[in-house]
Amino acid sequence: MSGTWKCRPRSPTCCKPSTSTSRSAIRAPRGASASPSLPVSDFGQAHMKKSIALASVVRAAAAMTLCALLIPTPIAGQESPGPSGAPALQTMPVDPLIEADWLMMHIADEDVIVIEAERRAGAFAAEHIPGARPLRFDDIAWEGEEGWIAEFREADEIAAALRAAGVRRDSRVVIYGASMTMTARTWVTFDLLGLGDRAFVLNGGLEAWKAAGGEVAAGPPAEVAPGNVEPANRVDFRVSADWINGRLGDESLVLLDARPDDEYTGEDGGLGNGGRPGHIPGAAQLYWEELMDPDNNTRFRPRAEIAHILGRHGAGEGKTHVVYCMIGMRASVDYMAARMMGLDVHFYDGSWRDWGDRLDLPVEMGPDPRDGSSDGPGP
């Protein structure tokens, strides 16, 4: 991905000029006598020291150039035009998944905070991981009067909700919830604020925790000291319907629809009064459960399988990807998978609830010609 790069040392000595100018560092040429060297005049000593110093500078400059060429590191927050005109996010692959055994070893660490993402009140009080803090979905997303919307709230509102849960700038946040769609959407919210590298998803959720021998608690959450987290520097990865519509037909644009067959094909007739049935023209159907373990839809497949599935749906390096579903919940799983692979991925927040309502936008119906669809219920 294009952009400005800076050198990242591979070791404490990489790109660091040597300060040694001792004469003992100068070795005799091969075949020369190993006997003591001839006396050197004051002028010769000064000239030798200057030569050694110059050689050190040249070697350091060469090392820095080589390091910059071999180990590029993107400067955070810098934008450059993407292949379809979107801001290039300069993403590196993220590793947001943790297992229950890791959490059991680190749950007492001072910087580890466990968040239970909940859609409705009451679930947390019934059963939760000890020490976890609830994060209500309506504190980080606007659901509308009828509940058929799930758009991100403003960054300062989201940050306030995270601070109320005790999240600090140095926190490592572990997220779990009743479903992977809810959990993934919460992780995407952290990523929107530039905190994706500080947030992690408990692979397998609460059931994985219990299966590993973890205890559970009940009752209201304990009071916690307010945190101090603030939005970090990250390019906004959201795109609008008009942005997508203006780029339909662009071969470098990959649209990923996370809905099941009946919604994608239009057989549902427009689920939830979501306007017209069908999908965005050219979109590939990557139903979110296809990325999950076939026996457990709260656990991701292995990374190699995820990479294969994404590639089968047209995703790849050098392309601009946009994920959507009905209201932005299921698309969060597709987004996470693309981020795990280091792809340039964007989020259509309005999703089909927005696109389907607009009569000025084109619609396609029928199955995905890539034959990458899979049946399954919605969230």
Image (cartoon, rainbow, N blue to C red):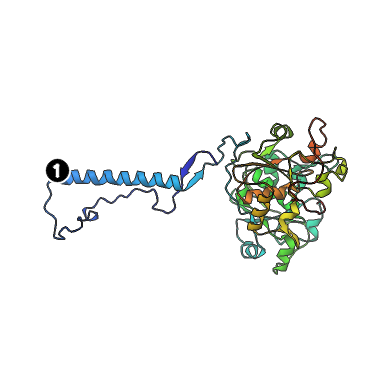
x, y (%) of residue 321?
Answer: 66, 42
| Residue linked to disc 1 | 43
x, y (%) of residue 353?
Answer: 81, 39
Left or right: 264, with 6 as reference point:
right
Amino acid type, label 1: Phe
Q: Depth check: 261 or 59 in front?
A: 261
Q: Residue at x 70, y 33 (%)?
A: 243
x, y (%) of residue 5?
Answer: 48, 41
Q: What SS does tag 1 mark?
A: helix
Quarter of the image holding residue 298?
Answer: bottom right
Q: Residue at x 81, y 33 (%)?
A: 358
Q: Depth check: 60 or 230 in front?
A: 60
Mark yes or no: residue 200 visible: no
- Please give the count of numbered marks on the rendered protein: 1
x, y (%) of residue 210?
Answer: 73, 66
Q: Residue at x 52, y 38 (%)?
A: 3
Q: Residues within 10 Å of mark 1 (few under 14, many from 20)?
A: few
Residue sticking out furthest to the front: 369
Mark yes or no: residue 283 visible: yes
Q: Depth check: 112 or 310 in front?
A: 310
Left or right: 355, with 335 as reference point:
right
Quarter of the image holding residue 239?
Answer: top right
